[in-house]
Image: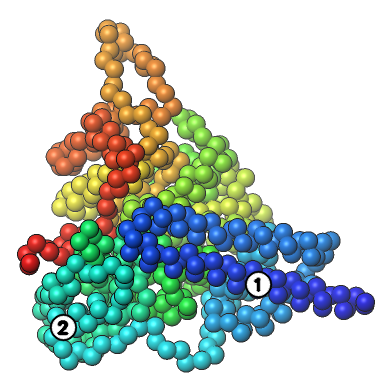
Amino acid sequence: MTEKAIHKQLTDICAKAIIKAFNEYQAKFKVITRRAKMRFENQDWHGMKADADERLDLYKKVVDQIVVEISRLLNNRISDKEIWMSIKTTYSGLCSKIDIWELAETFFNSVTRRIFATVGVDPQIEFVDTCTRTQSFRIPAPPYRTYAGTLSTHSLIEIILGDYEHQTAYENMQRDAKLVSEKIDDHLKSSGYSPSIDRAEMLTFVHYRGKSAYLVGRIFNGSDFFPLVLALLNTPGGITVDAVILSETDVSVLFSFTRSYFHVDVNRPDELVSFLKSIMPRKRIAELYISIGYNKHGKSELYCDLLHHLSHSNKKFEFADGERGMVMEVFTMPDYGLVFKVIKDRFAYPKNTTRDAVMGKYDLVFKHDRAGRLVDAQEFEHLKFNRDRFSDNLLDSLKRNAAQSVIINDDNVIVKHAYVERRVTPLNIYLHEVDEAEALTAVVDYGNAIKDLAASNIFPGDLLLKNFGVTRHGRVVFYDYDELCLLSICNFRVMPRSRSYDEELSAEPWFGVGENDVFPEELRNFMGLQGVLREIFLEHHEDLFDVHFWHQVQSRISAGKSIDIFPYGQNKRLAHGKIG
């Protein structure tokens, strides 16, 4: 066989092997996702959590397997770019035959980046224009049902609820339809809309997450439209509508970067993302893909978003707002909504951890229920930027403190490893920038954030204000993970009393302290709150300094009694007791 024939044979075999691996990944992804409906119907919340974990691990598992297979097929040609250019061309033709070609291209890039550890991007062996290219082969049926607004709001909602089939019956559909319709009619009136609905469009697939199911759509009123999201719970009496969400802000919180990913059985994720973008126009496309479980393609979209910003901005990377951390160097551009976090080579005293341990904390957060309080971080490798896009101070600091993570040469800055997160305002800065009413609200939510994290089996470790941030929706979140741990492993203790005046004045503790020991009464010394802010915090959250609070939460966790943390406010929930 000639060299040319061997080249073509290897090209065809490898391209087909990669597309086969992608199709197998997608099939397994959908099998896991489809189980969400059954989990919801059977109230199998432990099974739902197991499915979420399995799905998060799936992508890496499949990529690892195909990399081994391709390495075996190509053997000593594994790093031959000529053959990979041919594989890419053949693979592109195979992609063109499937609807989810953009996801398939991202999968191919994952394989090549694993093999070549590509710095920046290599258009010869990577698909680099996926995010900017459209490729439609048919006129698809819309992914939603349309409902004419000729009926009363009550009747319209009753029909909508009836169109979503679950093996578990509604507890009282007519009651819930009436309560939902009242919420909608009040919204129409208070927002200045006309009282009639022209039409509603509801996605045909249900969004499942945790213990809840969500029906997502939009309501048209004249030339305007607004979101309609119905949150369902499966209670002992049957399925109920728990809440109605009717604003962009509240839907955005539901799809927040601080939440776990939805399980949605959709054939064309791009169509779903397009629909979601219509009701959340300020959300990045990347965040929407990530929110429905396609986090790897979301990373590709995020990278495209970054390149687009760099091409339209003359700002430089500089230190992010807030106090400098002991573990991470954090930088951003003043006009960009993301921050980049790289692990330092050495950690300042008293930090006693390792690079691997820090990465383990981020992996824990990635797989854990973030409960609306932990910022999702996307892991990137081998990012390449022009050196002149960095401020001199930042370059100096990266050279001194992060040489293991960053390479700086005459022309470029290569970030070997980074976590990319949504930018939030550090809580300590926020409290000085806003008026007293907003500051008081944030302080109360700071305590709520600690309690929500505890309910989800997370102890932040370091409760300083600087480690918490405030989102654009005013919600307090936690983003410093190097001391974070599972609450269940903590040993919450009462502080032993000193036996003498000398012991009380001693700089060193006069009693033994274990690695996981926590003394809640000492936590108040780390809050950094003064005056009226301290008073309002104590008024709402004095129990955080009592060891009994933490023991009670631990008892509920060990007994398997989960505490519901809803991604919407109490005012969005229905008062089921008002109507029989």
Quarter of the image containing the C terminus? bottom left
Above or below, 454 against 379 in this view is: above
Above or below, 385 against 525 in this view is: below
Identify the mark at residue 524; answer none if there is no mark: none
Circle 2 residues within 10 Å: few <14, some 14–19, many ≥20: some
Q: Residue at x 37, y 75 (%)?
A: 205
Nearer the N terminus, badge 2 or badge 1?
Answer: 1
Tell me the amino acid under the disc marked 1: Lys
Above or below, 110 against 564 in this view is: below
Q: Is residue 466 visible?
A: no
Disc 2 secondary structure class: helix
Q: Is residue 366 left or right of residue 395?
A: left
Tell me the amino acid under the disc marked 2: Ser
Q: Quadrant of residue 383?
A: bottom right
Name the outermost residue toward the right: 1
Q: Quadrant of residue 462?
A: top left
Q: Which residue is mark 2?
A: 155
Q: Position of residue 292 (x, y in %)?
A: 43, 67
Foreground of the two, 480 or 34: 34
Q: Which residue is mark 1?
A: 20
How does the figure colour the protein chain or chains? rainbow
Distance CA(mark 2)–CA(mark 1): 47 Å
Q: Position of residue 117 (x, y in %)?
A: 68, 59
